[in-house]
Image: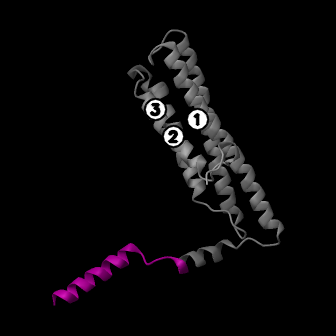
Amino acid sequence: MSVYVSQRSVSGQEFLKNATALVKYTIQKTKKFPKSMQFTFTNRLVNLSLDVHENVSRANSVYIYNRMPEEDFRFREMCLIKARSAIFSMSSLLTILFSMCMEGNNFLGDKKQTVSTFKEWARLLNYEAALLKGLIESDKKRYKRGKAQGKNPMPRNELIQAEEEASVEPLSEAILALQDDENEQES
């Protein structure tokens, strides 16, 4: 059974999908920029969109749980804040670029095409900023709820020890074991 569009909620991974779409769209559109704008706008826009994607990917790698160390929570929060900062920087660059295009330096085609290009960019940026704002707020609530339940965060050294015990053997040891097996089979 399908869910009506009006009753659907936002996916938990929507911020990653939108960040990927932002990078793809930015790269696709900046290919049309003239060489004279490569160092002033093109590289900066692409790098900022990649910063957004990189920071949301880093933040997504840190899962919030009850006994989470505060350092991990702060790292996740800082990554999301950096991503939002990159979005706002990108937005200001696009505002300058749009005004230049409307004043006559239009390299993206006619005005209608240019306006639709910048509208889509603005939609992607605004949607990503809203998703990240909501994610930051929900993360704070989840983290505070975990602390309010009386569950102390796991000390950092215990967490590292637990990760080491649960980790798989290093790749180099696995390769050496395979080489030993091959040597035994040959002899």
**In the image, residue 62 above or below residue 163:** above
* Secondary structure of residue under mark 1: helix
Q: Which mark is residue 21?
A: 2
How packed is label 3: few (under 14 Cα within 10 Å), some, or many (20 or more)?
some
Query: Is label 1 in contact with label 2 (beta carbons under 8 Å)?
Result: yes
State the mark number for residue 124.
1
Q: At 65% from the left edge and 77% from the top edge, which residue is drawn?
A: 158
Return the residue nearer the eye: 144 or 159.
144
Q: Is residue 186 left or right of residue 164?
A: left
Q: Position of residue 115 (x, y in %)?
A: 55, 19
Q: Which mark is residue 43?
A: 3
The crowd level at tag 2 (other Cα within 10 Å; few <14, some 14-19, many 20+) is: some
The residue drawn where x is 66% and y is 50% is 78
At 53% from the left edge and 48% from the top edge, which residue is drawn?
54
Amino acid tagged 1: Leu
Mark pair 1, 2: CA separation: 8 Å
